[in-house]
Image: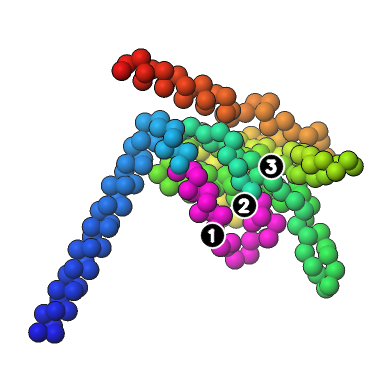
Amino acid sequence: MGLGLAIIVLLSIGVVLGFMVVQAMFAARKWRSVIAAGDHGALMELLDQTFDAWRNARPPNGTPPADWRALHTAALTAADHERIRVSILAEPDVRVVGGQRDEVANEYIVARRAAVRMVERLLYEVPHASFDAAQVDVNLEYRDSAGATQTRCLLTTIARREVAALSDWEEGEPDEMLAEWETVDGEGADEPDPDANPLITLDEVEAVVAAKAALREASQ
């Protein structure tokens, strides 16, 4: 009697787990199909969920605290089903060493490391989406002499999937990887203008979304 009950329980658990797996597969297929078809609302919902999950995740071992804080500031600038652009904030990596605060990396070094990690996330870690290219703009926020918050661009980079696929993600240095991409670094040079030749803009996306909405209304 006991053995028979145990078998029934195990079978029931197997059926429930199987149903959950099948349901997840259908949900993933639905996400991929609607995003590939250009459903901008679905894409925004997916990205919102993905960014929240990244913010709630634990940092991998060995990740500098300043890099992790920079990744947590990720804000979506614009996206469609082929391209995505985000901005993040970087600051110097300051740690307490021997009871004293020590700057172990300046804001530009943190910006390079965080930019590479952000590109990796956007190209390879967004579920149900596969972007052809990603732009990451890294800024520094500071207060001027009047106490107002100002922003300075540290670097901007555009990584295209076919180029990023050849990058050494395991052992490559951030400087080397950024040099392979379309990168403008502001250290020792003029401040980069991330809007000079952007991968994608919000106005562009809004225009496409509005045009599609108008077509749908005209066809009804």
Q: Nearer the viewer, mark 2 or mark 3?
A: 2
Mark 2, residue position: 72
Residue type, label 2: His
Specify the label residue 123 is tagged with. none
Q: Nearer the viewer, mark 3 or mark 1?
A: 1
Q: Earlier in the sequence, mark 2 or mark 3?
A: 2
Q: Is residue 145 above or below residue 4?
A: above
At mark 2, the secondary structure is helix
Residue type, label 1: Ala
Mark 3, residue position: 138
Could you tell me residue 120's position as x and y percent? 55, 47
Look at the image and say whether residue 59 sits in the magenta stretch: yes
Residue depicted at x 31% and y 52%: 24
| Chain part drawn in magenta | 46-70
Dot 1 alpha-carbon crowd within 10 angstroms: few under 14, some 14 to 19, many 20 or more: few
Nearer to me, 18 or 145: 145
Specify the label residue 57 is tagged with. 1
